[in-house]
Amino acid sequence: MRYKIFTAVLSFGLALAGCGGNDSTPTATSTRQPAPTTTQPAPSPTPTPTPAPAVTPVAETFVPNANIPDKMAFAPDGRLFYNELKTGNVRVVNNGVLQAQPFASIQIDGSAEGGLIGITFDPNFSTNHFVWVLYSAPGGRNVIAHFTDVNGVGTSPTVVFDQITWARFHNGGNIDFGSDGFLYVSTGDNEHPEFSQDKSSLQGKILRLTRDGAPAPGNPFGNAVYAMGLRNPFDFTFSPITGKFYVSENGPECDDEVDVIQSGGNYGWRPGYPCGDTDPNFIGPMIRFDKPIAPTGIAIYDGSVFPQFSGNLFLVDFKEGKLRRYPLDENAGKVSDPEIILNGEFGRLLDIAQGPDGFLYIATTSSIIRLVPKH
């Protein structure tokens, strides 16, 4: 549960040839002879491609002493942006160097699970330079806004949407653009399971918005809601291979999940939810955990540095500090048993992102590390 995540954080300082014919021209009196019959040899079987050898990953520190880097995102130009959950600062790492000054400093309510909780880049970043954020503002609202990047400094803050209520616990969430150009947002239920089943409520949902903050055309319920029945979806990712939509969902004392999101889908969180729910009226998870792990960041790898990871789903968690790698069959909607790549040695984990260099970047509560090839 996400309330466990950030209550714990506060206690210690707080997401793969034709045959040639006879080319002479016959005269009127010539007799064309039939071509001799030949037997062509059977073609050799096509050799099976040899898989690229596996590359062993090792973890190294990329940003030491990071201040609860809750979410990370890479700009199209390769810079790493990350949120400091409890300070409201957006930080930038350029060519491996952390900028001395924050990109932006946002006034937030950082109590309990509040803070600076989401970040992404506009699909038209190369022309409009918009950096989008999701944060808990004083007054009880989660706000979506964008800044304009001018030489590494966030300017012209513009609020686009401020209708998401937030509570001390079950606050979600993240933001990102889909391939359709619309903005997707994950929201928690604010500790009200009934909100998740109310189509008119924005809580316990996936929202889909235009850049102006209006409900995106084609939404299934005629409002901002895209999918429902969620409890506390911490993070989500779109597959770079198929475009499918995966979310990390925090359950109660059971049923932490990875769900595959569909338009209009109902994922079953509700008052009286039973552990191990199999109600056919709801969409079941692709991955379910019997006991809580507090899943946080989620990502699907499509880089070339680690060829054995291609198309695999990666999931990090807060409770156990594990990085799990799942071989993923997107057509079947199934995963195979995971490999545990990190097993608590870096403490609690908050986020995961693939860099443009093909390395995997993982946010802990006090640093950003990355997986690189072992030499």
Image: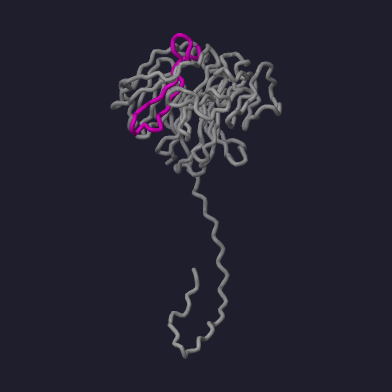
140 drawn magenta: yes
345 drawn magenta: no
Q: Give left or right: position of 103 versus 176.
A: left
Quarter in which the C terminus is drawn: top left
Of residue 184 and residue 343, the one placed in the foreground of this image is 184
Q: Where is residue 194, by image quadrant?
A: top right
Query: Residue 304 at x, y = what percent?
Result: 45, 43
Q: Where is residue 292, by image quadrant?
A: top right
Residue found 44% across the figure and 10% down from its top:
138
Query: Residue 62 at x, y = what percent?
Result: 39, 29
Query: Residue 365 at x, y = what percent?
Result: 46, 21
Q: Give left or right: position of 232 versus 88.
A: right
Of residue 124 and residue 50, the one placed in the foreground of this image is 124
Say if residue 341 shows up in the picture.
yes
Q: Give the range drawn in magenta.
A: 112-141
Quarter in which the N terminus is drawn: top right
Residue found 56% across the figure and 79% down from its top:
38
Query: Residue 237 at x, y = what percent?
Result: 51, 31
Q: Where is residue 37, by image quadrant?
A: bottom right
